[in-house]
Image (cartoon, rainbow, N blue to C red):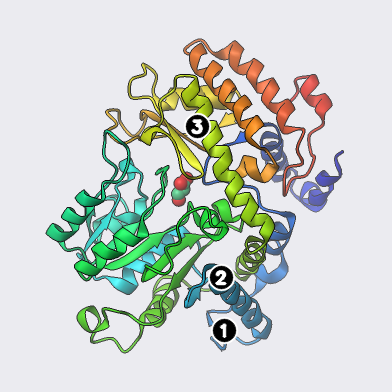
Amino acid sequence: MRNDAERYQRLKSEDPQLYRLLEGQIHAESTTLKMIPSENYVRFAVLEATGSILTNKYCEGYPGARYYEGNEIMDEIESLAIERAKSLFGAEHANVQPYSGSPANQAVFRALCRPGDKVMGMPVPQGGHLTHGWGVSFSGSDYTQIPYGPDPETGILDYDEIREIARRERPRMIIVGGTSYPRVFDYHVFDEIAREIDAYLVADIAHINGLIVAGAHPDPVPFCDVVSSTAHKMLRGPRAGFLLSKIEDRYHEKYHAKSRFNLAKRIDRAVFPALQGGPHMNVIAAMAVAFREAATEEFRQYGHQVVKNCRRLAEGLLERGHELASGGTDNHLLVMDLRKSQFTGKEVAKALADAGIICNFNMVPGDHRKPAVTSGVRMGTPALTTMGMKEAEMDRIAGWIDVVCRSLPDCEETAQRVRNEVAELCLQYEVPGIGRWVEQSEVVQGTF
Ligand code: DSN
């Protein structure tokens, strides 16, 4: 069935060169396992809103206070997205204009801190994000990162140590969140620590947004001054960011006595006009679509299935003798720990990709290898669960990962065999946002 290919006919006739590239990606994504934990499949409705004529409109400002005329409908769209975000997360205030997660975090720093301030965050090699104070990003060069991270032995956060660092360093802000931490965050303890030293508490939930709304991970919103997120990843929205916050600043007198703006207003002003220009209204509309979907019972079940699938995948790997950072997972991702292996994360990730299993190499706690090669492979289940896969498929996938790893370094033949089996499995599903593009016969003929 190739009906879905008809969606891009205008692109095909007007720009065949670009169309061929798009088709190549669709072909690849139809026949491989999307296991990078920050990736997912959005529904057609999200693609339609993103690709709509709303991309044509400029509307700097916020609903009811724009710098351009003709924005009555834009006001309604942005207000809808804001209301849905607030309702979905139970937040007092929402800003849906950040272009993505990094700009959202930049706005948080600007709204809460001054350049040079100490900010506690996890370094990238320990599972944090570039914008949590890592040196090569604005957050590390304009502010001072006070690092904390998982114990190198257990791979798990040591809250006593975090409390000790916070007491000693007294940072202005503590950021809780990560890109490769396979366990839950205890926001209650972080809140206690932050209160003790009058620090702002910020949760970056980009990776776990969908788990939180599904009730499959603790909720940071009641504890945090600000919560930042992307709209994509598990939430299955467009590539964008958003911010949730309290309205009032509990430390206004201490840190912002000279400002006449409350916390919500400072967040808004940090996004626009301080850091960004015109909001991307097509993307904000798509965000509203995604927020609506995320509020459904179907999505709640999806979030729980993501975790069940990831746990089963982890068990499948552990049973076959592989080691995992922190010994397993409580969320949507796991990290294979290859510190004792002769093969690097980069080598294993490449072999798995050749077999149609798309993951990424990643540092593990206590890694002795360089970031360009690493001792870890990060993988997750959000996209596979969106496809409809369950525990039985996770068992099969763990088996494939195992045979590919065992066939290194001469893994070409094994990778090709697994590649065929992976494609056959993928083609049993209708990929959301893609549909059925590749035919089973192409796999049989080996033309994928
Ligand atoms: N690039 C994202 C990830 O893969 O985790 C984080 O923003």
Q: Is residue 356 visible?
A: no
Label 3 Cα neighbours within 10 Å, binned few <14 / some 14-19 / many ≥20: many
Q: Nearer the viewer, mark 3 or mark 2?
A: 3
Please name whichever residue, 71 or 350, is drawn nearer the observer in this view of the structure: 350
Which residue lies under the disc numbered 1? 63
Residue at image position (46%, 59%) is: 101
Q: Residue 305: image x %, image y %?
A: 61, 45
Which of the labelled discs sits on residue 314, or is there none? 3
Residue at image position (58%, 21%) is: 399
Q: Nearer the viewer, mark 3 or mark 1?
A: 3
Mark 3 or mark 2: name the one nearer the start of the chain: 2
Question: Is 327 on the left or on the right of 258, as rendered?
Answer: right
Residue at image position (58%, 77%) is: 83
Please tell me in which quadrant of the rendered image residue 172 appears: bottom left
Q: Residue 95: image x %, image y %?
A: 49, 73
The outermost residue toward the left is 168
Mark 3 and 1 residues: CB-CB less than 8 Å, in contact? Answer: no
The quadrant of the picture occupied by the N terminus is top right
The quadrant of the picture occupied by the C terminus is top right
Measured Cα–Cα span from mark 3 to mark 2: 32 Å
Q: Nearer the viewer, mark 1 or mark 2?
A: 2
Which residue lies under the disc numbered 2? 85
Mark 1 or mark 2: name the one nearer the start of the chain: 1
Please tell me in which quadrant of the rendered image residue 391 appears: top right
